[in-house]
Amino acid sequence: MDDYDFEYFVGDLWERMGWECNVSQASVDAGIDVVATKPNPYPQKTIIQAKRYGPNTTVSGPAIQQYASLKQQESGVDSVVIATTNTFTRAAEKRAEELNVKLVDGDDLVSMVDELGAEDLLEQYDIGEVEGAQSDNETQSAQSHASAIASAESEDGLLARAVRARDWYSTLLKATGLAFTALLIGVLSDGTNIGFLGAVNSAAETVFGILLIVVAVALYLDIRYVRRHSSWNPTTWLYLVGLFFFYITVPVYLYRRREAI
């Protein structure tokens, strides 16, 4: 699809998530591609910059700075989202985190289409084949570019891919349920050091310890997902510390997450 169709596609995709979207007219576009609003659970307003890029073009750090300033063009804007068919550079991801800009790359878009069952949207847009084949020099250049990006990947980039790799929200729910079960078994068998009940108590404590680590990892990765896909920015360290001292932070997080997404 062309650039303008991509803007409409992004708007349609956000509407599937419950937003009301207005795509800017090409003739009067001042830099904001899509304005998305949602009245519930509280009034929210997001501006979206849609960048349809080819495989050799990434969104850079300076571009994040530029698009973040678009927030000044509209009143009452809660967040800025940049959606691209390709990827973001390491500098762009770092700058976006500093400026509270949400990033949605090509992999995220594919995941959103899959999770929302929005494959039918693709059929509404004309998708043509790229005419001609790449020359050897173009292919080599593309491979070199890909290698450069790969070698520049930081730990943050690896974590970003981990966030996209699976549904950490589901893992968080399952691990939390199992952890509570292990904790309950441990409490019921507490004080018994011999025989079958003693072995059960020891096993329950071990399982609970392992599950607590799994919950912490899933919580951390899911928080990163939420920060990128909603206007809510949960304080990571607060929820993680609370997890180990006051387990109640998980139900609180799940409740607030449901309101945000």
Image: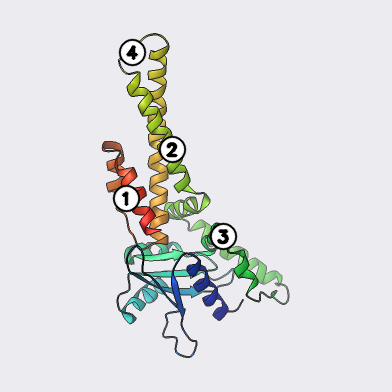
Q: Residue at x 36, y 65 (%)?
A: 40
- Give whichever of discs 4 and 2 has the lower sequence position: 2
Residue indicated by mark 1: 236
Q: In which quarter of the image is residue 49?
A: bottom left
Residue indicated by mark 2: 175
Instruction: Give whichever of 207, 155 is nearer the camera.
Output: 207
Label 3 to label 2: alpha-carbon separation:
37 Å
Q: Which residue is drawn at 46% across and 39% down?
A: 174
Q: Residues within 10 Å of mark 2 (few under 14, many from 20)?
A: many
Residue indicated by mark 3: 147
Name the amino acid type tagged 4: Thr
Q: In which quarter of the image is residue 103?
A: bottom left
Whether residue 44 is visible: yes
Q: In which quarter of the image is residue 101?
A: bottom left
Instruction: Give whichever of 8, 214 is nearer the camera.
Output: 8
Residue extending furthest toward the right: 132
- Give whichever of discs 1 and 2 has the lower sequence position: 2
Quadrant showing the C terminus: bottom left
Label 4 to label 3: alpha-carbon separation:
58 Å
- Give whichever of discs 3 and 2 has the lower sequence position: 3
Q: Which of marks 3 and 1 is in front?
A: 1
| Position of residue 134 measured from the top left corner of the image (x, y, whole percent) | 70, 72
Name the amino acid type tagged 1: Thr
| Position of residue 247 measured from the top left corner of the image (x, y, whole percent) | 30, 38
Q: Which residue is drawn at 47% across and 52% down?
A: 163
Q: Which of marks 3 and 2 is in front?
A: 2
Name the amino acid type tagged 2: Ala
Name the amino acid type tagged 3: Ser
Q: Nearer the viewer, mark 4 or mark 1?
A: 4
Residue indicated by mark 4: 192
